Image (cartoon, rainbow, N blue to C red):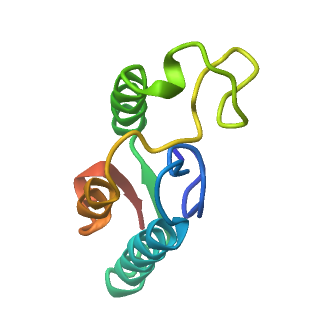
Amino acid sequence: MSGFPNLYLLMGPGTGLGHNSMIFMIEAQVRYALQCITTLRDRNLRALDVRPEVQSAFASELYEQLGRTVWSTGCRSWYQTADGRAAALWPGFTVSYWLRTRQLDLRDYQPVA
């Protein structure tokens, strides 16, 4: 989360599933967080902060993809916010999440020495 250096969420927004096991998602999240922590140690950094424009682009992509799912067709469920936005779910296949979290890209972060 931009503005919250070194904050790593498990099962945060955009990671819930309505179609598969969360264990797979949690494992991918832990692996990614460990890459971040290892990078901090290996590069002697104090923090990694997600660049705001990277977070914004990711959120926009996520909401666009969610707009094409059943969760955005007028149904009501616990996956949605009060205004009907399905902010909790991952809109794609679990393998697409795994691919996105497989390798840390330092260009997405502002390192703090």
Does 92 sit above or below residue 61?
below
Identify which residue, 81 or 103, lies in the foreground: 81
Residue 16 on image: x %, y %: 55, 50
Residue drawn at x 39%, y 81% as measured from the top left: 44
Identify which residue, 54 or 41, lies in the foreground: 54
Q: Is residue 21 left or right of residue 28?
A: right
Q: Quadrant of residue 45?
A: bottom left
Q: Is residue 22 left or right of residue 67?
A: right
Residue drawn at x 69%, y 31% as measured from the top left: 77
Does 59 sit above or below residue 33?
above
Residue 22 on image: x %, y %: 53, 65
Residue drawn at x 44%, y 71% as measured from the top left: 24
Q: Is residue 101 left or right of residue 8?
A: left
Does 75 sit above or below residue 95?
above
> If the image is split into quadrants, where does the C terminus sit?
bottom left
Identify which residue, 8 or 113, lies in the foreground: 8
Q: Is residue 18 left or right of residue 56?
A: right
Does 89 sit above or below residue 19?
above
Q: Quadrant of residue 28?
A: bottom left
Residue furthest to the right: 82
Residue 85 on image: x %, y %: 60, 22
Q: Quadrant of residue 81?
A: top right
Residue drawn at x 55%, y 64% as measured from the top left: 6
Residue 40 on image: x %, y %: 41, 77
Number of marks in the rendered image:
0
Identify which residue, 93 or 100, lies in the foreground: 93
